[in-house]
Image (cartoon, rainbow, N blue to C red):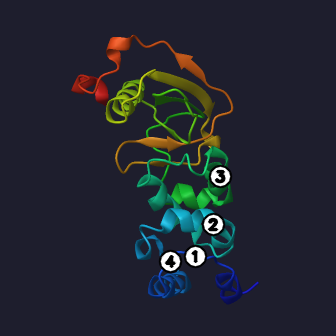
Amino acid sequence: MSVASTLDLLDFAGVEENDAQHFRAAILRGENFQGYIPSDALDFIVRNYRALAQLQALEPAWLDCYVHSSHFSTYGIETIKAIFDACDRQRLRLLRPITQIAGDRATLFRGCAGPVHTMGMSWTSSLDKAIWYAAYHATYYDLTDCAVYVTTMPVSEIYCCLDHYDHDCVAHPLSTWRVYVPAEEFRLDRPRESMR
């Protein structure tokens, strides 16, 4: 299928025609289109990720979209994982290399708060940072039941690592378990020395 015919299959619902034209031109030039439709990019990618993967246009836009979004509950973890699975993993790792992890296996942590703890795609190699994330979610979203989860997994199963806000590994571990953390440790003013 040609690039033009694949472009014709894209669902531009809710995207202004002028923005859609800029988007099409960006794809044809091999550029990241996310900046042309920043407020609509997440919905657009969710609707069109398979075609975008065929166009080899998915990875840069998806990574930019993912790092600047915070709530994926509307789509569900299965959809977010499916988009990462549609990406070319080598291209993801070229754009966002796996850093700060030595060896063939990684130990990763995830901080959660609230009545439901979703094992999402963002993990950190820092226990302190996972505790901070749980406290952050509890504080800013008025949630309780803070927790930290841990997993160990082969580095080869990590999609990539992001470093826009913090060092986060994008992964979907098969097994996780809860780590005991005393309640008083879930606070935003954790000592700076421990936040490395």
Q: Which of marks 4 and 2 is nearer the N terminus?
A: 4
Q: Earlier in the sequence, mark 2 or mark 1?
A: 1
SS label for mark 3: helix
Q: Which disc, if any, is residue 15? A: 4
Residue underneath mark 2: 47
Q: If the image is split into quadrants, where does the N terminus sit?
A: bottom right
Spatial distance from mark 3 to mark 2, Cα to Cα? 10 Å
Q: Residue at 49% across / 86% down in the picture?
A: 17
Picture quadrant of residue 103: top right
Locate residue 102, reporting x and y percent: 50, 34
Q: Residue at 54% across / 64% down in the picture?
A: 43
Q: Which of marks 3 and 1 is nearer the N terminus?
A: 1
Give amino acid for label 2.
Answer: Arg
Q: Which of the two marks, 2 or 1, is nearer to us in this view? A: 1
Q: Quick check: 36 above or below 2? A: above
Spatial distance from mark 4 to mark 3, Cα to Cα? 21 Å
Spatial distance from mark 2 to mark 1, Cα to Cα? 9 Å
Crowding at mark 2 (Cα within 10 Å: few <14, some 14-19, many 20+) = some
Q: Residue at 46% across / 35% down in the picture?
A: 124
Residue underneath mark 1: 13
Spatial distance from mark 4 to mark 1, Cα to Cα? 6 Å
Crowding at mark 1 (Cα within 10 Å: few <14, some 14-19, many 20+) = few
Q: Which of the two marks, 3 or 1, is nearer to us in this view? A: 1
